[in-house]
Amino acid sequence: ELTPVAIKAGIRLAQRLYGGSSQLTDYNAVPTTVFTPLEYGCVGYSEEDARKKFGDEALEVYVSYLKPLEWALNHEEHKGEPVRQDNAVYCKLITNLQDNERVVGIHYLGPNAGEIIQGLAIALRAGATKAHFDDTIGIHPTVAEEFTILKVTKRSGESALKKGC
């Protein structure tokens, strides 16, 4: 994941030195994925860094745990099991309440994290808000759809475990 960052930084530097540009590389919005058997991907602020930058009261953190359809259909050991926090996909959307609920961080642990985070990185860079995510019609049944229907917040105290489709 260092190569694309280095390429973009080099292009930006050349544009500033020889093309009259003043645009800088936004290192906070670099999408990252860890390609382990259960992938993890993120873009933007971590929850901890967002709290330091914006403050606790400025943030709303939406979360969900769910079992993807492909686990239910393809993996015998998961059939009939209820969704458990320790055996589930995890989706997190961090928003800034003081900026129209602009999305400042996206985190995902589950299948195809690289593919999902790459698309969501564009939304984050474009300044998408929670309302933009809510107004988007998700592709059903996909795990990425979960980002369009996140309702449970950490501060609500409600269970983020999702059951069913």
Image (cartoon, helix red, strand yellow):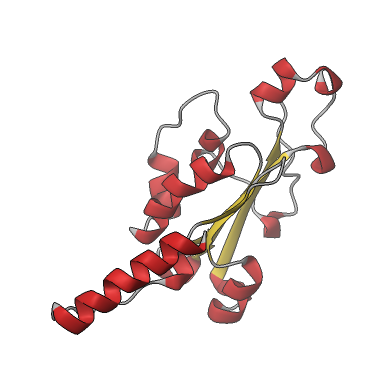
Q: Which residue is depicted at the point 45% across and 48% down?
A: 118
- Relative horizontal placement of residue 36, taking residue 49 as reference (left or right): right
* Residue 73: % across, % down: 71, 16
Q: Which residue occupies 37% across, 65% down? A: 7
Q: Is residue 153 visible?
A: yes
Q: Residue furthest bottom?
A: 17
Instruction: Reply above or below: 74 against 37.
Output: above
Residue 140 image offset from top left, x and y in percent? 51, 24
Identify which residue is drawn at 45% across, 72% down: 27
The front one of 139 and 5 is 5
Q: Position of residue 131 (x, y in %)?
A: 41, 49
x, y percent for residue 146: 56, 37
Q: Residue at x 42, y 45 (%)?
A: 119
Task: Give the side of residue 101 with respect to residue 9, left or right.
Answer: right
Determine if residue 92 is in view. no
Q: Is residue 24 rendered to the left or right of residue 37?
A: left
- Residue 134: which quarter of the image? top left
Q: Is residue 99 above or below residue 39?
A: below
Figure quadrant of the C terminus: top right
Q: Quadrant of residue 135?
A: top left
Q: Nearer the viewer, residue 146 or 154?
A: 146
Q: Can you tell which quarter of the image residue 136 is in? A: top left
